[in-house]
Image (cartoon, helix red, strand yellow):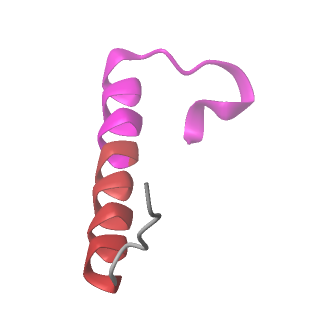
Amino acid sequence: MTSQRHTMPEDVLALLNATLMIALAVNLHRQAGLSTGARSSI
């Protein structure tokens, strides 16, 4: 099996998807009221 590198558009799309998933997780975390203590402002 030969290894293949990702193209630049694939890398950019992966970074955008990861950013959106993290933003969604943070938003859901905030709305659920799960943050307590000093980190509640995240």
Majority secondary structure of magenta residues: helix
The image shows residue 28, relative to residue 36, as above or below, that is below
Of residues 37 and 28, the one nearer the viewer is 28
Residue 37 vs 26, above or below: the answer is above
Farthest front residue?
1
**Magenta-colored stretch includes residue 20:** no
Q: Residue at x 55, y 21 (%)?
A: 35
Of residues 5 and 9, which is closer to you in this image? 5
Task: Please tell me whether residue 20 is drawn above or below residue 22 in the rendered image.
Answer: below
- Stretch of the chain drawn in magenta: 23-42
Query: How far from the left and from the top, in percent, is residue 37?
Result: 70, 21
The percent coordinates of residue 24 (x first, y second) are 29, 40
The residue sitting at 42% across, 17% down in the picture is: 33
- Find residue 1 and report its horizontal and vertical position in percent: 43, 54
Say which quarter of the image contains residue 17.
bottom left
Of 30 and 25, the residue lying toward us: 25
Report if residue 39 lies within the magenta region.
Answer: yes
